[in-house]
Amino acid sequence: MELHPTRARTIWMWLPIVLILVGSAACVSGGLGDAENRRNNALRRAALAYELRTRGGADEVLVDFGHLEWRDNLGFDGRTVWLNPFARDEYLALRDPRHSYIYLHFPQQMEGDFVMEVERGDPSGTFKHRLKLRLQDGSWVVIEDEAIP
């Protein structure tokens, strides 16, 4: 079955317009998984604020994020590097080991709460711990801080 040339031209004319409109609607709505993005970034902000308050600052913050997530301001004044799964290993292999860092791993849901592994590193070595976060009165709060051997 062949399309009449006029009909084919009409389809090719409208297809880019429809794709642009659909893409614009996705951007305006905040993208796919907007509630999940907001939650994950709120979890990251809470974990980072706790980490800075408890253990002090660092030269940079490294953040794991998914392919469909958008990046947000986490409240860190220094350099923030967002690591998607494809670039993570390459960046970690090439980063300057003289700089200290806080590495926020991807948040995982566990029994209604969320758990986030946090790694700190500097020229003297690395230290890993697991933060458990719970939603209390509309804000995420660290309720448990456990060292990971």
Image (cartoon, rainbow, N blue to C red):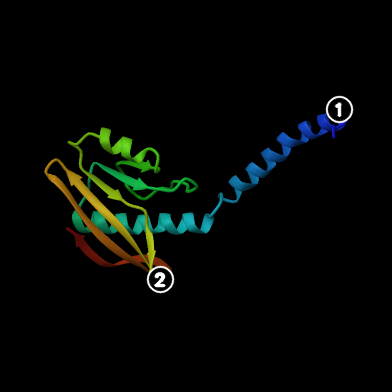
Query: What residue lies at 28% left-to-right and 48% top-to-bottom?
Result: 103
- Residue lying at the far front in this picture: please name it: 1
Q: Are marks 2 and 1 in contact (CB under 8 Å)?
A: no
Mark 2 Cα shell of 10 Å, populated few (<14), some (14-19), many (≥20): few
Up-down relation of residue 125 to residue 148 (above or below):
above
Q: Amino acid at mark 1?
A: Pro
- As drawn, is 36 to the left or to the right of 44? right
Q: Amino acid at mark 2?
A: Gly
**Tag 2 secondary structure:** loop
Q: Nearer the viewer, residue 95 or 42?
A: 95
Q: Which residue is mark 1?
A: 5
Residue 134's spot in the image, x, y percent? 36, 69
Query: What residue lies at 47% left-to-right and 54% top-to-bottom?
Result: 37
Q: CA distance from mark 2 to mark 1?
A: 57 Å
Q: Which residue is mark 2?
A: 112
The quadrant of the image that shows the C terminus is bottom left
Quadrant in the rendering for residue 95: top left
Residue 127's spot in the image, x, y percent? 18, 52
Q: Nearer the viewer, residue 39 or 84?
A: 84
Residue 114's spot in the image, x, y percent? 37, 64
Query: What residue lies at 22% left-to-right and 45% top-to-bottom?
Result: 58
